[in-house]
Amino acid sequence: MLTAIPSLLVLPPPRTTAVPTNWSPYEDEVQFRTADFLYRRVEMSAGNINELLELWALNKAKQDELGPFSSYEHMYECIDATRLRDAPWKCFTVGYAGDIGPNDPSWKSAEYEVWYWDPEVVMSQMLDNPDFDGQYDYVPYVGLDKSGKRRWTDFLSGNYSWRHSTNIYENDPSTEGAMYCPVIVGSDKTTVSVATGHVEYHPFYISPGGVHNMVRRAHRNAVAPTAFLAIPKGDRKYDNDPAFRKFKRQLYHDSIATILKTLRPAMSMPVVRRCPDGHFRRVIYDLGAYIADYPEQVYLAGIVQNWCPKCTTLPTDLDGFADRRSQKFHQELVQELDSRTLWDKYGIDDDITPFTYHFPQADIHEMLSADLLHQLIKGTFKDHLVQWVRDYLYLEHGDAKANEILDQIDRRIAAAPAFPSLRCFPHGQRFKQWTGDDSKALMKVYLPAIAGFVPSQMVQCIAAFLDACYIACRADITEGSLQDLDAAIKKFHTHREIFHTSGVRPTGFNLPRQHSLAHLISQIQEFGAPGGLCSSITESHHITAVKRLWRRSNRYKALGQMLLTNQRLDKLIRARADFVVCRMLPPTHAPPPKPILPPNEDDDTGIIDKYVTGNITLARTRERNYPHYLQDLAQHINQPQLVELTRRFLYDQLHTNDSTSSSDIPLQQCPYPTSKISVFHSAVATFYALSDESGIRGMRTERIRSTPSWRKQGPRHDCALVVEDQDKPGMKGMSIVRVKLFFSFTHDAKTYPCAFVKWFKRIGTAPDPETDSKLRQLYLTTQIGVAWEGSYDFGMFGKRPKLPSIAKQFAVLLINLTAEDLTSTLIINDCCVQCSISAWYNWVDIGGVHFIFTNFEMYWYWLHTIKYYSRFLIFCRTGPKNLKIVFRLVSH
């Protein structure tokens, strides 16, 4: 078996023998950090570097000293002099190999350059990166949860790695004890000139398969731009020329085969390499998954457009049953059938020889991974479902009425409240250039926006699809999750028929990107959680590996300048890593580049790489203009209960081992905080993120706000889900509160961070025949909750409020959580708009359910969206003076 036994069964030798004071090729720490800061971090232009260095030298001249560099040329020379694990760019040229006549098109006589890094050198350097220690798997494994059921996370937890490593050993027992190292590859075209779109590049990436998914997603140098593939161009009249298309496809495959050929010897004979933990191991490489969107998958698989690259289903019946494709199966068909039959019956282009034919164990049909971004989020959701809803409205209501409804939907989308990770769309859907981040943001708020405007079956269809997406986006997927995913996909396919019967899709649903859902479960079992192999990883690397480098060039024959810049950046990164190993610099982990957000976009979210448990911390800076003592503060915020609740809270904190509760003793026996009170307008929650972007250990931060004025638009008081009993799943162990005030005080030299909250109470449950979900009644009580101590489970103290017979104030809340997987505090948005029950209202009947529209109108729908788990509201009434407001709790 490939057990990854280290070559040395003792402590590994040191990675470096460098002297801790040797900054070579730099003179000292200041010189290196200056170069790193100016060139890598702020990307300063050469002219500005010179200007800064001149000012620096002018200041130093007063002490008869010199600055770190004399000019930008001097700084560049120092960076170029770095020889630490140097990997220079190489180039080969390719061109048409057939006969070329005098009147043949120019693409036949042209030569195309392919620039690349030696992938064997790149892989060796990434394996030797100590930054991956503790986040790298050395052997394939079968992950099990606490109940003994299978769970899939990182790449080596999938069946693909286990099967291939077993085959390698069975074919050559001399590989016993070697380390199986799959090489994940990916490619994706990208445009760098935003205005014209005429400048494009085709980067090719590689990544070691043993690196954990979180590290691969976190821009920790686990994905390297290894090559820039050629993009042949021809006159428009040759766009559909079969010879030109064949040339482009075969050029693509031959280029990849040439780039990867240095890895081929180590796919049969192990080579000794140092690993992230410092040990040397015998490493045997293997081609792992290939990350690509559907158009590139067609190129890679050598199939006809609109066919599936994973199976042989006909493009006219993609929901039908068919056999899986394989390289061996294709070879047998090519030997037996003619080209026309292969093209028409099996969707095979026999003119193409995939690059995987040149590598042992490799099968391109097996390698292609699921692509959540292009197949599901941008493809099925944005390009299909959202457009189909628009088409339905125009078919059903005509242009004028449909435009009116779409405007109402846009107003609902635009009314989304300020909340961490919830994007603001000021004009709804009305903008042209949709990015992947835009589509993800729209998914969070789209479902409530269309409720009431389209048939309930359409709403259920999109709800089921969103459920499938968010399950697939999880970092850990269990057998139960796969069952839920399968149920969601089946429900989506069932309710999808409404688009067929309504005339929106009269020809059916033979769409390759939607068909990919049929392979999603098997892909998870093969490769682990699909988020670690999503094309969003390569797209995000376009920013640092292509787009930013192009913008730093002079735009003329920019590729050479981009490669030089990339090489210098790599030298700086590797030099910093070496200085960190020598303990000459502290370790730093740069977060992924943030997307460009619209002005005033809320930025209250973040990722965190530290080993921490979930926790809540108050803001660093206290707010001024608040009274400093408890009684005065209670009067200032017009909440006299604050004094009593705080005193009882403090009693409970001081008597944690006492069976007597503060609610059982007179108030006079409770201690009175005499220290100054500090007030804060926010707190930061750190928790384990199920599906959101997170750090390498799955942790994420979000800011909870409670402020009397937010962006000059009135007060903002966020809500929170409070874990009261961790032994109960989901909402059964949680309560809902609205934060009215964050504050802290000191008693006996101990600081108590607190929150003054309003409690929500839910009563009763009933099945919802339309959504098959649980309905809960929700009232906002007029009593006020009490503070909690700063811990991740929001431990609550004090007497719970009683539910009044008729609430004088009310609010509505909508929640949709994964009950069995919810293990930490989640924060939800400012969802509690209050109004008098006697306020003006108007009942509207939609599909037999009464909806209430207050003077807040469209705002109602959007106050109640929780992160990714959007659902539409249901308002029910039993009488004009007894308003019951219902929210849905969906347990996957």
Image: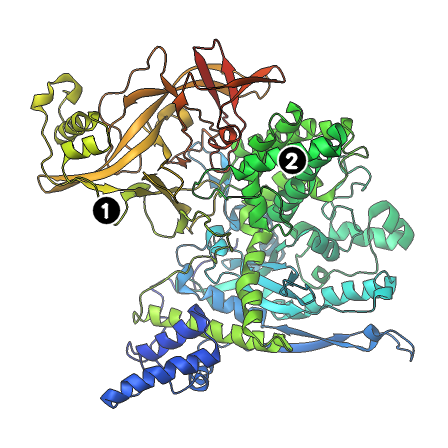
* Residue 726 visible within the image: yes
Q: Which of the pair 703/166 is nearer the observer?
A: 703
Residue 714 percent across, percent down from the top left: 38, 38
At label 2, which amino acid type do we have?
Leu
Q: Is residue 500 above or below residue 667?
A: below
Q: 10 Å neighbourhood of mark 2: few (<14), some, or many (≥20)?
A: many
Name the residue at 79% across, 50% down. 305
At label 1, which amino acid type do we have?
Arg
Residue 269 percent across, percent down from the top left: 58, 66
* Residue 27 visible within the image: no
Which residue is disc 2 drawn over? 406
Residue 845 percent across, percent down from the top left: 60, 16
Residue 805 percent across, percent down from the top left: 35, 10
* Res 425 quadrant in image: top right
**Label 2: which secondary element:** helix
Q: Is residue 117 above or below residue 695?
A: below
Residue 64's tag is none
Looking at the image, residue 313 sits to the left or right of residue 269; the answer is: right
Q: Which of the pair 627/202 is nearer the observer?
A: 627
* Res 615 quadrant in image: top left
Name the residue at 37% across, 82% down. 53
Distance of label 1 from label 2 (alpha carbons): 44 Å
Circles 1 and 2, Cβ within 8 Å, touching? The answer is: no
Q: Which of the pair 83/692 is nearer the observer?
A: 692
Which residue is disc 1 drawn over? 622
Looking at the image, residue 169 sits to the left or right of residue 475; the answer is: right
For this orientation, the residue located farthest to the top is: 879
Mark 1 / mark 2, whichever is N-terminal: 2
**Label 1: which secondary element:** loop
Of badges 1 and 2, the one in the foreground is 2
Name the residue at 52% across, 63% down. 283
